[in-house]
Image: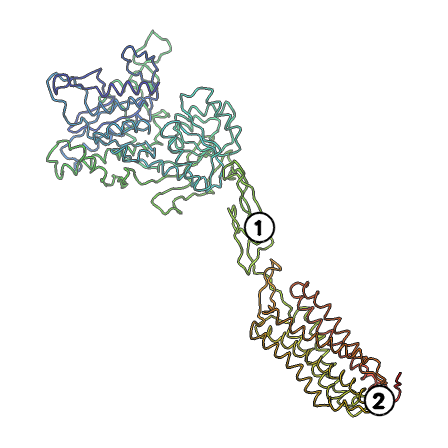
Amino acid sequence: MESVFTLLHVVMAMVNFSSTNGNFCRLQGDPVYPQLSKDGDIIVGGIFPFHRTWEITDVSYVVKPSPLNCMSLDFRDFQLSQSLIFAIEEINNSSSLLPGVSLGYKIYDTCTSAAMGVKMAMVLLNGNENLTLNEQCTKPAQVLAIIGETQSSVSMAIAKTVGTFSIPLISPYSTCECLSDKRIYSSFLRTIPSDYYQSRALAEMVKQFGWTWVGAIRRDDDYGNSGMAAFTKAAEQLGVCLEYSLPFFRTYSQEKVLRIIQQIKSSTSRVIVVFATHWDLEILLNVFYEHNITGYQWVGSEAWISDSNIARLDKHKILQGAIGVTIPKTTVTGLKEFILDIHPLKSAGSAIFTELWETLFKCKYKVQNDSEHTVLCTGQEGLSEMDNEFTDMTLMPIFSNVYKAVYAVAHTLHDLLDCTQTCPTKKQPDPLTFLEHLKRVHFKTKEGEEVYFDKNGDPVAKYEIINWQTIEDQHEFVTVGLYDSSFPAHSRLAVKMASIVWAQNTNQVPVSVCSESCPPGTRKAVQKGKPICCFDCIPCAEGEISNMTDSIECEQCYQDYWPNQHRNECVKKEIEFLSFEETMGILLTAVSITGTLLTIIIAIIFLRYKNTPIVKANNSELSFLLLFSLALCFLCSLTFIGRPSEWSCVLRHTAFGITFVLCISCVLGKTIVVLMAFRATLPGSNVMKWFGPLQQRLSVLAFTLIQVLICVLWLTTSPPFPFKNIKHYKEKIILECQLGSAIGFWAVLGYIGLLALLCFVLAFLARKLPDNFNEAKFITFSMLIFCAVWISFIPAYVSSPGKFTVAVEIFAILASSFGLLFCIFLPKCYIIIVKPENNTKKQIMGKGTVK
């Protein structure tokens, strides 16, 4: 029906004046008169919805539709018109602003209809006069600027119309973000912030309270739809999701309203953001009570959150704890008294004055049908003892917006007319020139408040955060925070959390989330088919951490770090190497030193008894060289213990390789000497001259030099180096010596094995030589132990992890060294110390028999 009236009334407005005889005009249709008016040199227009609705009539499209019959006088918008009158009267009485120029006003009622709004705007532009004289149609607009409308949808319709003529429309209460688009609404300005900032303020507030899962109800018009779209966009950027967004309009059927109720009841969110007007809340409150919609946390836009009438109507405390943004409190000196003194309005508009009086005092001037229950108006009624919507001044900030709009017009006009002591002309300026100057106006009100417009025609956005608190069983509006868009983004919102009373009169912040927050150590994984606020918490993968709540992804720890047990922090990886401080390192060090001391003791014994037969018979020179090499073998195991470094990695492998070759070379030399000595006892044999002391020394030197050459080649091509092994254990680093060239390492071991095998074979062949003390037999045992140890070492070395690899190598070195020491020298020491009577040449040589 609204669309039908829009079409019909706009057509009527546009043909209000029609050219009939050439370029001359006459009025078409019925004249429309202002509700409130006053003559002046320059006229300021006003368009306000004095009435909330209209009587719906049947449109047959056959006859001209009758004018709208407006109903339900709205005190709030009537007070806005009073604010306009107050500002104009104050300017007319001013000696400094527009001296000598009087402002007049014409204020029309839109009846909340966009079509009526456009029609009244055209009336303000064209005039209503029945032109009897043949005057041309081309004449300036009747008004300099229009103050109004309060509803965004109506303002949009008017702004599109008057923008073509460059007539400014300054709204005190239309907040739709869409009106900031100067390409469409070129002449629209406002003294109330855009919903762009209100939506962001609401979104930031919701986020600060930890609500990520909210519902929404919006007025089903440009104000509600645009405001909720802006809120949704801002909320999504902050990680807040809407479970539902339900449209509502006061003309909705009962079936539509019930669907809204069902959606709210079936939802899981406990917070509802409402982008609607106070008229919508008046209807919804009754519906919520009927269907027991209680216990929700309400978040409101400035269109209703500070409305005292809604607070009075909420007798069941459904909106208890509601929180939202509102225009900061302000005062205009003298305005309250002017509004409450309604008698001067009688001269400005008798019909609307009569209706206001009858509505305020619930009386009638004329009694219809002799009704017995009708109270007659005396004209002496007063507002002093009344407490109703009209006497409530909580909307003073909006009244102030009207006041600032009128003053913006006056200051612009003052500058354009070059007024000083007086204004040299009273001629109305060109609309386009006036509009451009109005956009740049900048002044201070008498209360010191700065007024100016940005490039979109909007003022600086400042809001108070208010909270509905129950005091003595009545709702009270308590300021609990501020929002200032001129501040940096991170500091625009300031809320005193301790001052807030939440839904159901609790001090505990309500919880409204789709999924509980993911603790550090986990990440969010969005549930399939659901918004991003609905998620599962998945532990971070191995090697990854998250150190904040609700982390979207886990971070990989750096190479030398590893997650702690809770996977919320990267800690330095444990570094593993065989150290001198740990038990295993201490034991191996002790065994190594013990072996060295035993070797030294045996060397001392041999040195003490070097002239005895048993020492002489066993080639004392090779024996001492063997003992020296065994001492080095024991000591070289110490190079494997401790933190690997470049020098220790090189030393441990080369020292081990060379000392063991020296040791095996000595054993090999002793074995060959034994064999040669036996051959020398045979008749006609002179073999000993080919393997005398010089040859023995040279053979040991030659065998050792070969190993030295292998080590030099290894160190020259690709030497061992310290290496951090992070692959074997993920949670710790193994410090080890990388071999460099594996060929070099196995060449060193292979050469040692080759000499040991050769020594074992020769000793085995000489095991039954006819000496009382068979040297070859003990060498065979020692080589057997040596080979067994190193053969078992290979698989143990390959399979042992970390520091145990080094421990296995040390054990092999010590075991084989002890095997050589004990098998070769212990029997001799036994004879020297325990059985000295057997330490004679006769005993050594005399009892052997040849088989």
Q: Which mark is residue 839?
A: 2
Q: Residue 501: x percent and y percent?
A: 48, 37
Q: Residue 758: x percent and y percent?
A: 73, 77
Q: Which residue occupies the foreground of this view, 587 or 435? A: 587
The residue that disc 1 covers is 541
In the image, what residue type sits under mark 2? Asn
Q: Residue 492: x percent and y percent?
A: 38, 45
Image quadrant where one finds the N terminus: top left
The residue tagged with tag 1: helix, strand or loop? loop
Q: Which residue occupies the foreground of this view, 593 or 120? A: 593
Q: Is residue 837 left or right of residue 762?
A: right
Which residue is the extreme one toward the front? 684
Q: How many marks?
A: 2
- Marks 1 and 2: in contact by CB < 8 Å? no
Counting residues from the N terminus, which is met first, the one under dot 2 or under dot 1? Answer: 1
The residue tagged with tag 2: helix, strand or loop? loop
Q: Residue 791: x percent and y percent?
A: 73, 69
Q: Which residue occupies the foreground of this view, 654 or 146? A: 654
Mark 2 surroundings: few (<14), some (14-19) or many (≥20) residues within 10 A: some
- Check the image and report above or below for 533 versus 265: below
Q: Splitting the image into 4 quarters, where does residue 169 fall?
A: top left
Image quadrant where one finds the C terminus: bottom right
Q: Is residue 143 left or right of residue 687?
A: left
Q: Splitting the image into 4 quarters, where does residue 458 fall?
A: top left
In the image, what residue type sits under mark 1? Ala
- Check the image and report above or below for 824 versus 280: below
Q: Is residue 684 left or right of residue 721?
A: right
Q: Measure the alpha-carbon separation of dots 2 and 1.
A: 73 Å
Q: Is residue 683 left or right of residue 258?
A: right
Mark 1 surroundings: few (<14), some (14-19) or many (≥20) residues within 10 A: some
- The label nearer to you, 2 versus 1, is 2
| Colour pattern of the rendering | rainbow
